[in-house]
Amino acid sequence: MSEARPILKVENVTKTFGGVVANRDISMEVREGQIVGLIGPNGSGKTTLFNSIVGYHPIDAGEVWFKGRPLSRLRVGAIARMGLLRTFQQTRIYGKMTALENMLISLPQRARGVFDLLRPRGVEGMERANELLQFVGLHSKRHHVAGDLSFGQQKLLEFAMALMNEPDMLLLDEPTAGINPTLINGLIDRLKRANEEMGITLLVIEHNMRVIMNLAEHIYCLAHGEMLADGPPDAIRNDQRVIDAYLGAH
Ligand code: ADP
Ligand code: MG
């Protein structure tokens, strides 16, 4: 795996809000096919880093590279069309539409070219939507109004909606937050399968240590907006700086 080429490179990224330095001189790398974790106490800059990567806001310094191309001048939509998508800490589904309708409207985010735009995507889109609802275990709920699904099911739906766009890489912001333990195991299993079977590279912000140690092969740890440490799960688990950062935060 370590010989795989980097798909995402973050180089010396700094992002400030007024006087607050939310990300200071952050560098990291994710290789194609990896599942990488991003951890750190609340307020350490994890979500900001995702926003910096996907072009949600301009950065003050540094550069982000995806598949060898610099992203800093591109907008969210253009970055999504290159195959890089993110999900949000709070789900962004349409509560009054059914699960299936949510799947179908999430499709056009990533048209690959003019022929894709011209091709009627009705039947194909419907098939894919049904397959992916099956994949996340929501097929029997496809005609339920999304707002009536449990929070965990809404997160699974959001994950399936992201998959509709056939991303090459997904950034997931606390996918298991607020989900009950049974669904957490199901979600971890789906994340691993999306990685193994669909070849999607994953960068996952995760608060639950057990989850991230089980999921990621490499973990980056932020504290106070700076990169504190990175390494394989066992090294991170035993890193005194990481332990202190978490203890200091509570
Ligand atoms: P995390 O996701 O690790 O909990 P965030 O990236 O959300 O941390 O926040 C990092 C810091 O940046 C915090 O001090 C937060 O208050 C600040 N911050 C984040 N987004 C904004 C914003 N849009 N405007 C001002 N400050 C922000
Ligand atoms: Mg956050």
Image: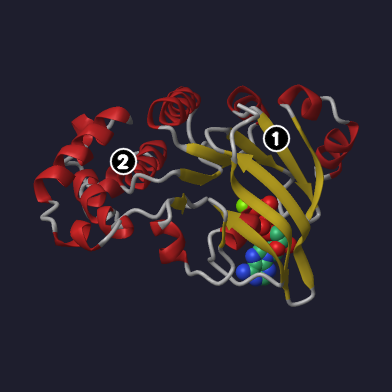
Mark yes or no: residue 177 visible.
no
On screen, 208 above or below 164?
above
Location of mark 2 (residue): 149
What residue occupies the far bottom of the structure in this picture? 18
Q: Residue 87 carries which label?
A: none
Residue 98 percent across, percent down from the top left: 20, 48
The residue at label 1 has a CB less than 8 Å from ligand 1:
no
Ligand 1 rendered quadrant: bottom right
Instruction: Describe residue 91's horizontal placement relative to residue 8 as left or right.
Output: left
Q: Do the residues labelled 1 and 2 touch (CB within 8 Å)?
A: no
Quarter of the C terminus within the rendering: top right
Instruction: Describe residue 117's horizontal placement relative to residue 57 as left or right.
Output: left
Quadrant in which residue 138 is drawn: top left
- In whole angstroms, how far apart are the C-alphas of marks 1 and 2? 32 Å
Q: How is the image coloured?
A: secondary structure
- Disc 1 is placed on an element classified as strand
Q: Which mark is residue 219?
A: 1
Residue 118 percent across, percent down from the top left: 14, 61
Give neighbour class at mark 2: few <14, some 14-19, many 20+ (Cα, 10 Å). Answer: some
Q: What residue type is labelled 2?
A: Leu
